[in-house]
Amino acid sequence: MSIGTLYLVPAPLGEGSLDSVLPADVRAIANRIDHWVVENAKTARRFLKLYGPERTIASLTMATLNEHTEAREVNALLAPLLAGHDVGVLSEAGCPGIADPGADLVRLAHAKGIRVVPLVGPSSILLALMAAGASGQRFRFHGYLPVDAGPRTERLRELERDSAKLDEAQLFIETPYRNDALIDAIAQTCRPQTMLTVARDVTTADELIASKPLSRWKNEPRPELHKRPAMFVLYAGK
């Protein structure tokens, strides 16, 4: 019996037409996959309905892989693949395996000799970096910064030092309701000439990308960021 293929299927970053963010061939592949590993089943069903698949969503097999999945459980998710079925991996938003628990399944798939195919779609990390005007040669994504003020300040200073020393862009995110507090902390901690890019609601109708020195972020009116998904790029290089 042949082994199935593990497809990494990007999901939209927000509401809107799939045509602008996912190529037709990606949608065609997703439409023929019956077995899925998803971060959130409810979100995955809503997303897959947008494809207009011929079979019903209820007929699809969905297993959950998220931050609560134990390592011993991940191996069992390979069973459909080893039985010859293709499997799609779907994150909440963006690309599976990028800042996402799907990477654990991908690693196991490679160890078992299973073909892994990444499909084209939106990545908030790369899109924010593309639009930042920061270094695209050297960059790091750090996920979430510390919540408490002391450790967060220390971490921001470290990121700014590394950015200046290595000509490196530093990318991170925040829980959306703390976006404004994060910008306040960055403006109070880092140098006025250091650049900060905020990429909000990327690829949606409400997309906003602003890149300017912290002196301006501190003194000028800010865009609406409260409870809006955003990516932050800190750059103290050239």
Image (spheres, helix red, strand yellow):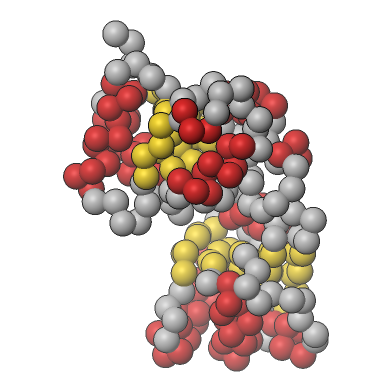
Q: Is residue 168 left or right of residue 7?
A: right
| Pick the front one: 233 or 175 | 175
Q: Is residue 125 above or below residue 120?
A: below
Tell me where residue 122 sits by quadrant.
top right
User: Quick one: which residue is furthest to the left in this view?
Assistant: 72
Q: Is residue 36 above or below residue 150?
A: above
Tell me where residue 211 sits by quadrant.
bottom right
Q: Is residue 208 left or right of residue 181?
A: right
Q: Is residue 178 above or below residue 166?
A: below
User: Quick one: which residue is furthest to the top in this view?
Assistant: 1
Regarding residue 200, the answer to whether it shows in the image is yes
Locate residue 32, reporting x and y percent. Answer: 54, 21
Quick one: quadrant of the N terminus? top left
Locate residue 101, reporting x and y percent. Answer: 38, 49
Residue at 36% across / 39% down in the picture?
63
Residue at 47% across / 86% down in the picture?
153
Residue at 76% across / 60% down in the picture?
207
| Pick the front one: 85 or 191 | 85
| Pick the front one: 86 or 62 | 62
Quick one: quadrant of the C terminus? bottom right
Q: Is residue 62 left or right of residue 23?
A: left
Residue at 73% across / 83% down in the picture?
217
Locate residue 197, reporting x and y percent. Answer: 68, 69
Q: How many marks?
A: 0
Regarding residue 97, the answer to whether it shows in the image is no
Tell me where residue 228 sits by quadrant.
bottom right
Locate residue 47, reporting x and y percent. Answer: 59, 42
